[in-house]
Image (cartoon, rainbow, N blue to C red):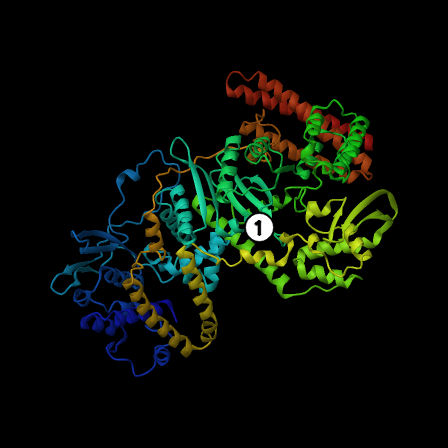
């Protein structure tokens, strides 16, 4: 079906559904020569076949004739229920005819009812004369589209009939009408519908770019001409809706989104801080799932600062922990104004407030001094540990001794006594000659924050670095970028957290509904571990169960009901471990302190279990935070999506996916396609009437207008954020490349910047390349080739040329003609010198 045929079908269907007066039906009936009040005797498919494959005729001439059958008298007798219906009718008529329209003057009464409305041709009027004589023009003027066309369409509200009647209709144009292929580019016939916007926004939320979304619509529609809008329209619609979301300001929009989540989730917590100018300075939020997770897994807290996640360059602090599946879990996040001590103190105090006064037992950071002092002030009882990865990186940048860096990293992770550590440290600094190094002295003073010898026995869930937090930042960067406004940032962050929790639910399913394959020679103990621990923790425990076979007994002793076992590793007797076993309480304590540090039984404990003939792991050797059932206390919360618009888009996607199969099969058959199209047209009108009657909006309103209106009632009286400049956002920024001469690509202020001299220089270089090629034909060995090129082309030519040109440029203090004359002399001198060198080389070769 051609484009004109489809439009005429749309006009016919529109007239029938709107049920405008008899004269309108007669007018439209003249287009197809049958009465629209009666259903055609033949079906739509047969009618199309009899019409030559498209409704409206075989050729464009016939289509123009059918459109031209509408006369002025016919249109003047039309009536419309609403102003929007009249506008749609005239716009559809304009699209069939080949011109565009735009709204002109109108008048409304005190009740907001439009008394009259006028539409004109898009070529009506003339461009203002001042734009033709604009002197400071920096770009090409837009093409002229106004020709003073007088075509128009005017309706007036009739109080007696409560309808809009046509009072004026001019059909004549003073310009050529657009062809069928050009109509798609006229502005009034390009529009991104609400359904298309909803689909585009859902794709945008998952990271698709506008150009990619546009290509998706093109593929779905079967070509650019069938989409109904251009990529610029899509950009404008997305930007328009984004501006509506933050019409009170970016900060107001973000806080309104968080307030909406608070209304639906009583346990949702957010708090913000305002600076002296009334601008939003800092923001913290945590939902009910994060607060519940902290109540169970909040013994260890890892937080780090990441950058380039929002338009305002506000550093993002993500407070991360580890759950019972060894997956990262987010306890909360905060946007900061800067990285001062007071700022971090505000974050920690707000975090403790959100967690109802509960504080973490251990904290791990990257070593920032302001962060460290804030932890000392707010969390004095927490064991603070510095990231081993950051320490090793700092050591490599401050100490240029590879031996020291390698031995320092091994000593930092070595599980030994404090006396052994002090002895090894003294030997390390003496042998590497860094005793007097100030950075090494400062590092040693903070040894209790990074040395495993001092941190043994403190629970850190098996973590020695902030890489878990760094990994979280890398994951968030897939959803966040440095161009995001605050309102977009909080929504994208919410989507990223939803994905993390989805992966957590998958890990819960794997642990609870599947069983691992037992592979060790101790199936009883291995099966006991598989029943108690989550899957990822079980794999870690099984490694230690396998290692118990590598231990050699060094004897044992008994004191009453308690026994003490001594073990050493096979092949290494210099290290021994002691395991105390309390038979009455079935409690095991090992000198390696792995259970206290990581919460899992070590290989030495498993060896004692084997010796004692145990077939299950004692309760005292099981840390509750790693077990399967620990999540039951907080897993009953329902996932919440605060924005109704996201719910609407989800429903739209579901319905669209449900129709895909039906539409796929119908697209192969003409009769099925036509029947399905009629069904869609009928139900679309009915559903739209319900949509308007229930107050969701009308034409021109976005589908999320009700959500936006609810949000508009919330005002916080805040100004938008200022752009911040923090410590880490520019450390690894690439240096801006320096500008250089466009000819020689070497100097910025090149002596050959004059166009004439540069052209001579470029031609001179081309001549040098020609000479080089001539020499290459005569030379057979690589050594002779390199010698000739170096002497003739680069050394002699470069030195002689620059020497003479610089001398000429020095004397060029007068007029420009002296510079050109001197440079010509310099070029002649260079050519003579090159000719002499070339003759010598040829003589040498001969």
Q: Can residue 60 be seen in this view?
A: no
- Quadrant assignment, res 139: top left
Residue 463 picture quarter: top right
Which residue is at the far front? 560
**Residue 325 shown left or right of residue 667 in the figure:** right
| Residue 379 seen | yes
Seen from the viewer's position, the closer of residues 218 and 113 is 113
Quick one: SS at disc 1? helix
Q: Residue 200 in the image: x percent, y percent?
A: 44, 56
Q: Which residue is drawn at 36% across and 41% down?
A: 716
In the rendered structure, the answer to whether residue 609 lies left or right of residue 361 reads right
* Spot occupied by residue 306 in the image (x, y as percentages of width and height): 56, 40
| Location of residue 545 in the rendering, given as x and y in whole percent from the top left corner | 77, 55
Residue labelled with disc 1: 296
> In the figure, 244 relative to 769: above or below?
below
How many labels, in total?
A: 1
Query: On the rendered structure, is 611 left or right of 163?
Result: right
- CA neighbours of label 1 inside 10 A, class few (<14), some (14 to 19), many (20+): some
Q: Where is residue 720 in the image (x, y as percent from the top left)?
A: 40, 38
- Residue at 52%, 21% (x, y): give it: 817
Q: Which of 720 and 35 is in front in this view?
A: 720
Which quarter of the figure has residue 402? top right
Q: Which of 298 and 318 is in front in this view?
A: 298
Quarter containing the C terminus: top right
Seen from the viewer's position, the closer of residues 115 and 321 is 321
Quarter of the picture containing the N terminus is: bottom left
């Amino acid at each position: 079906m051609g484009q004109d045929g489809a439009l005429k079908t749309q006009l016919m269907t529109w007239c029938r559904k709107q049920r405008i007066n008899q004269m309108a039906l007669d007018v439209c009936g003249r287009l197809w020569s049958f009465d629209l009040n009666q259903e055609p005797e033949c079906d739509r498919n047969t009618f199309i076949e009899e019409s030559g494959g498209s409704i409206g005729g075989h050729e464009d001439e016939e289509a123009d004739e059918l459109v031209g059958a509408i006369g002025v008298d016919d249109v003047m007798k039309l009536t419309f229920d609403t102003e929007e219906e009249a506008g749609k009718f005239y716009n559809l008529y304009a699209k069939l005819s080949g011109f565009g329209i735009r709204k002109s003057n109108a008048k409304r009464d005190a009740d907001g009812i439009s008394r009259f409305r006028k539409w004109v041709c898009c070529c009506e009027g003339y461009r203002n004369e001042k734009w033709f004589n604009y002197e400071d023009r920096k770009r090409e003027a837009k093409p002229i589209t106004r020709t003073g066309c007088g075509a128009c369409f005017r309706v007036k509200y009739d109080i007696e009939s409560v309808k809009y009647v046509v009072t004026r209709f001019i059909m004549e144009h003073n310009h050529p009408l657009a062809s069928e292929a050009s109509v798609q580019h006229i502005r009034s016939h390009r529009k991104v519908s609400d359904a298309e916007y909803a689909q585009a926004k859902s794709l945008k939320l998952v990271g698709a770019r506008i150009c990619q979304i546009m290509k998706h619509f093109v593929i779905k529609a079967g070509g650019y001409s069938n989409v109904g809008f251009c990529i610029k329209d899509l950009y404008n619609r997305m930007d328009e809706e984004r501006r509506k979301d933050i019409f009170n300001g970016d900060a107001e929009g973000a806080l309104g989104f968080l307030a909406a989540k608070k209304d639906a989730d009583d346990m949702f917590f957010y708090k913000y801080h305002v600076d002296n100018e009334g601008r939003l300075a800092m923001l913290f939020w945590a939902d009910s799932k994060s607060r519940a997770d902290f109540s169970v897994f909040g013994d260890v807290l890892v937080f780090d600062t990441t950058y380039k996640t929002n338009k305002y360059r506000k550093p993002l602090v993500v407070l991360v922990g580890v759950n019972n599946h060894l997956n990262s879990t987010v306890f909360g996040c905060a946007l900061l104004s800067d990285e001062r001590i007071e700022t971090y103190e505000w974050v920690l105090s707000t975090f403790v407030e959100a967690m109802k006064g509960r504080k973490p037992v251990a904290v791990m950071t990257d070593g920032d001094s302001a962060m460290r002092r804030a932890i000392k002030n707010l969390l004095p009882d927490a064991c603070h540990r510095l990231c081993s990865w950051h320490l090793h990186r700092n050591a490599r940048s401050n100490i240029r001794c590879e031996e020291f860096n390698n031995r320092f990293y091994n000593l930092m992770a070595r599980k030994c006594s404090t006396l052994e550590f002090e002895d090894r440290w003294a030997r390390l600094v003496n042998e590497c000659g860094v005793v007097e190094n100030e950075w090494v002295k400062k590092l040693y003073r903070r040894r209790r924050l990074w040395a495993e010898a001092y941190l043994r026995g403190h629970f850190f869930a098996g973590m020695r670095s902030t890489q878990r937090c760094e990994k979280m930042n890398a994951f968030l960067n897939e959803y966040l970028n440095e161009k995001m406004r605050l309102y977009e940032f909080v929504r994208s962050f919410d989507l990223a957290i939803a994905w993390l929790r989805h992966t957590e639910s998958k890990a819960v399913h794997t642990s609870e509904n599947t069983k691992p394959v037992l592979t060790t020679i101790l199936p009883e103990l291995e099966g006991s571990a598989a029943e108690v621990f989550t899957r990822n923790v079980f794999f870690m425990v099984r490694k230690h169960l396998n290692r118990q076979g590598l231990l050699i007994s060094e004897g044992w002793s008994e004191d009453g009901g308690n026994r003490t076992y001594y073990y050493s590793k096979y092949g290494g007797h210099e290290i021994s471990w002691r395991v105390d076993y309390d038979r009455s309480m079935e409690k095991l304590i090992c000198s390696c302190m792995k259970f206290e540090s990581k919460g899992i039984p070590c290989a030495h404990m498993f060896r004692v279990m084997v010796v004692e003939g145990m077939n299950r792991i004692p309760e005292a050797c099981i840390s509750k935070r790693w077990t399967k059932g620990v999540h039951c206390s907080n897993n009953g919360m329902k996932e919440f999506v605060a924005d109704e618009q996201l719910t609407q888009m989800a429903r739209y996607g579901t319905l669209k996916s449900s129709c895909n199969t039906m539409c796929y099969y119908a697209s192969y058959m003409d009769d099925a396609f036509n029947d399905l199209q009629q069904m869609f047209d009928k139900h679309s009108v009915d559903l739209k009437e319900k949509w308007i009657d229930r107050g969701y909006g009308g034409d021109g309103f976005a589908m999320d207008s009700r959500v936006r209106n609810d949000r508009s009632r919330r005002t916080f009286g805040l100004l938008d954020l200022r752009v911040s400049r923090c410590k880490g956002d520019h450390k690894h920024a690439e240096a801006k490349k320096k500008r250089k001469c466009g000819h020689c690509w070497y100097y910025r202020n090149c002596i050959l910047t004059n166009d004439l001299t540069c052209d001579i220089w470029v031609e001179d270089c081309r001549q040098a390349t020609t000479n080089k090629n001539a020499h290459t034909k005569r030379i057979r060995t690589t050594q002779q080739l390199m010698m000739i090129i170096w002497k003739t082309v680069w050394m002699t030519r470069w030195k002689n040329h620059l020497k003479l040109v610089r001398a000429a440029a020095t004397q060029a203090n007068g007029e420009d003609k002296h510079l050109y004359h001197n440079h010509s002399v310099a070029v002649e001198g260079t050519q003579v010198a090159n000719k002499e060198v070339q003759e010598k080389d040829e003589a040498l070769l001969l």
